Image: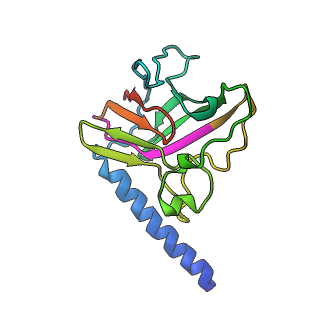
């Protein structure tokens, strides 16, 4: 039995193989090599006018970051998975009195991400102790692994959002979450 691939399929397989190799390399950069699925929780420390606030309890957000036009990014969970990834998820809320759009600047300034449209691809996690910055992961076509194509958000409404990063090493407990046009928030990762 012989399987024949078209040139396009063959290029796709090569791209997938390269991306898988890079993903393994990126995941391996964090060190630790721990394949356990540790629980992760985070909390933001209250900061005067940074827009971040401390919330504890299962129904309370981990952090709230204020943005432009009444938009607020509420981070509800920060979870590590056994594949070496860290997923930040929550809601984008419009606390303003009129409909608003998430700024195109939240996609960051990398050409590869921008060409895929609106997203939260400019988000980063900063580990100041190790002097490392973790960028949003991308798929084999360069699309960011985040919420994309966000609609206009009506006043008082919210939409679910997520961003996926390479996980910092398990020894890293404190990182700062950053997203263009929003205040930064220090969060603590446990696990």
Report x, y in % for residue 106: 54, 46
Report x, y in % for residue 109: 48, 55
Was residue 127 drawn as part of the magenta stretch in this picture?
no
Image quadrant for the N terminus? bottom right
Was residue 165 drawn as part of the magenta stretch in this picture?
yes
Is 29 positioned to the left or the right of 122 in the image?
left
Front-most of 41 and 52? Answer: 52
Please tell me in which quadrant of the rendered image residue 61 appears.
top right
- At 54% across and 54% down in the image, what residue appears? 144
Front-most of 119 and 98? Answer: 98
Above or below 108: residue 59:
above
Above or below 33: residue 62:
above
Front-most of 41 and 47? Answer: 47
Point out the stretch of residues depicted in magenta: 161-171
**What colouring does the structure picture have?**
rainbow
Report x, y in % for residue 182: 50, 35
Can residue 2 be seen in this snapshot?
Answer: no
Report x, y in % for residue 8: 61, 81
- At 51% across and 68% down in the image, what residue appears? 16
- At 35% across and 40% down in the image, what residue appears? 126
Image quadrant for the C terminus? top left
């Amino acid at each position: 039995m012989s399987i024949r691939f078209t040139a396009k399929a063959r290029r796709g397989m090569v791209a997938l193989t390269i991306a898988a190799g890079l993903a393994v390399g990126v995941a391996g950069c964090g060190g630790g090599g721990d394949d356990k699925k540790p629980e992760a929780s985070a909390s933001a420390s209250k900061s005067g006018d940074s827009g971040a606030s401390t919330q504890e309890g299962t129904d309370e957000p981990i952090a709230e970051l204020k943005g432009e036009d009444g938009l607020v990014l509420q981070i509800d969970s920060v979870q590590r998975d056994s594949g070496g990834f860290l997923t930040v998820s929550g809601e984008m809320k419009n606390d303003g009195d009129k409909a608003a759009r998430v700024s195109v600047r939240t996609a960051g300034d990398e050409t590869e991400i921008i060409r895929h449209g609106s997203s939260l691809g400019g988000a980063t996690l900063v580990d100041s102790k190790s002097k490392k910055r973790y960028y949003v992961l991308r798929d084999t076509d360069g699309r960011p692994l985040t919420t994309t194509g966000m609609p206009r958000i009506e006043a008082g409404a919210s939409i679910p959002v997520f961003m996926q990063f390479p996980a910092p090493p398990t020894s890293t407990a404190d990182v700062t979450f950053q997203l263009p046009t929003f205040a930064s928030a220090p969060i603590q990762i446990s696990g």
